[in-house]
Image: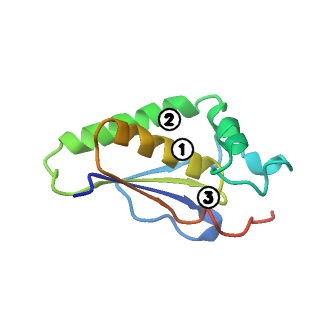
């Protein structure tokens, strides 16, 4: 049974998916989209991941998300997966990177993880 379900998404592509914890990265963390050399890349690209993970505060958000997963897994509803959603504007950079990192950290702890990138492969939203 999947213990943790993590989804990345872009608010510009639709409403946030249902999740126990939803983390909105739009306003507090710089968007790689504004850098022309990163705009059409995704979290699959090392340059994007490096840019997102170098953002002040993002490591603390990831640590807090991991702590929330641990807390929910310790609760009385252990028969249900913990659902976490990370959102940013387009779902290609910040949210996808954060979701992938949290998924890897949970897997490294031996948890069964399902990672879904809802909007990662959708067209870039030009603002």
The image shows residue 22 at horizontal and vertical percentages of 45, 52
Which-is-in-front pick, marks 2 and 3? 3
From the viewer's perspective, is 15 left or right of 103?
right
Q: Name the residue under label 3.
A: 91
The residue at the point 53 percent across, 65 percent down is 118
Q: Nearer the viewer, residue 63 or 116?
A: 116
- Considering every residue shown, the one lying at the far left of the view is 76
Compared with 68, 124 (above or below) is below
Q: Quote the CA–CA distance across marks 2 and 1.
A: 9 Å
Image quadrant holding the C terminus, namely bottom right
Towards the viewer: 1 or 27: 1
Residue 61 is labelled as 2
| Cα gap from disc 3 to disc 1, whole angstroms | 10 Å
Other-residue count near label 1 (Cα within 10 Å), few / some / many at <14 / 14–19 / ≥20: many
Whole-percent x, y for residue 44 in the image: 63, 51
- Tell me: 21 left or right of 38: left
Circle 1 — which element? Answer: helix
Q: Which residue lies furthest to the right in this view?
A: 36
Report, in whole angstroms, how far the alpha carbon at label 2 lies from the one at label 3. Answer: 17 Å
**SS label for mark 2:** helix
- First in sequence: mark 2 vs mark 1: 2
Write down the residue under mark 1: 98
- Residue 78 is tagged as none
């Amino acid at each position: 049974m999947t213990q943790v379900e993590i989804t990345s998404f872009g608010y510009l592509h639709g409403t946030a998916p249902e999740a126990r914890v939803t983390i909105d990265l739009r306003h507090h963390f710089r968007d790689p989209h504004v850098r022309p050399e990163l705009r059409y890349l995704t979290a699959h690209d090392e340059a994007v991941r490096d840019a997102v993970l170098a953002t002040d505060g993002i490591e603390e958000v990831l640590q807090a998300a991991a702590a929330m997963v641990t807390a929910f897994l310790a609760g009385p509803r252990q028969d249900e997966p913990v659902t976490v959603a990370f959102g940013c504007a387009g779902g290609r950079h910040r949210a996808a990177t954060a979701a992938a990192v949290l998924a890897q950290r949970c897997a490294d702890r031996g948890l069964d993880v399902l990672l879904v990138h809802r909007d990662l492969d959708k067209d870039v939203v030009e603002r």
